Amino acid sequence: MKVIEMARRLGVTVDTVRFYTRIKILRPGKNKANGYREYREKDYNRLRFVLSARQLGFSVDDIQEILYHADKKKSPCPTVRRLIDQRLNETEQRFAETLQLRERMQQAVVEWSQKPDKVPTGHMICHLIEEFAQ
């Protein structure tokens, strides 16, 4: 199938298919008559897997590592378990940081509602931010 057909079947852009081809996750054959890339069902299944893995938070590097094991006919499951633990820990950390940011923002909203507007000076641009950061 052509790149446009592959993209349509998976509900992605042509650029997405080309990206995964460029980084060699997909390895389509070439049509001898016209030189166009031809994607096989194997490529379709592989990209479907990649898209599923991306939805779970796996990085492109993670996916390449997983596919390396699969291509060597070794179970990628231990690698998948290890990587998902790492991604979960990273997500938990980002979530905690986001909650802290939310609290700072809520505090700023309350404090700033009581403060007057000020014109910038040579030493200050916006006193709300500058005083809050201290």
Image (cartoon, rainbow, N blue to C red):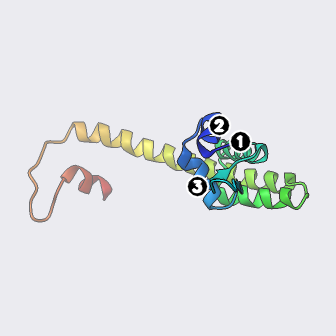
Asked if the residue at tag 3 contacts the one at tag 1, i.e. Cβ–Cβ closer than 8 Å, the answer is: no
Determine which residue is flagged by label 3: 19
- Per the rendering, the mark at residue 126 is none
Nearer-N-terminus badge (2/1): 2
Nearer-N-terminus badge (1/3): 3
Asked if the residue at tag 1 contacts the one at tag 2, i.e. Cβ–Cβ closer than 8 Å, the answer is: yes
**Distance of mark 1 from mark 3, alpha carbons?**
14 Å
Instruction: Farthest residue to the bottom: give it.
Output: 123
Q: In the displayed structure, does residue 107 sit left or right of residue 69?
A: left
Determine which residue is flagged by label 2: 10
Between residue 13 and residue 34, name the one nearer to us.
34
How many numbered marks have been drawn onto this rendered protein structure? 3
Q: In which quadrant will I find the N terminus?
A: top right
Q: Quadrant of residue 117?
A: top left
Q: What residue lies at 48% left-to-right and 47% top-to-bottom?
A: 100
Determine which residue is flagged by label 1: 48
Nearer-N-terminus badge (2/3): 2
Q: Amino acid at mark 1?
A: Arg
Secondary-structure class at tag 2: helix
Instruction: Farthest residue to the front: give it.
Output: 33
x then y, percent, for residue 102: 44, 42
**Distance of mark 2 from mark 3, alpha carbons?**
14 Å
Secondary-structure class at tag 1: helix
Q: How dense is the environment of label 2, judged by Cα within 10 Å: few (below 14), some, or many (20 and up)? A: some
Q: Quadrant of residue 45?
A: top right
Between residue 65 and residue 101, name the one nearer to us.
65
Secondary-structure class at tag 3: helix
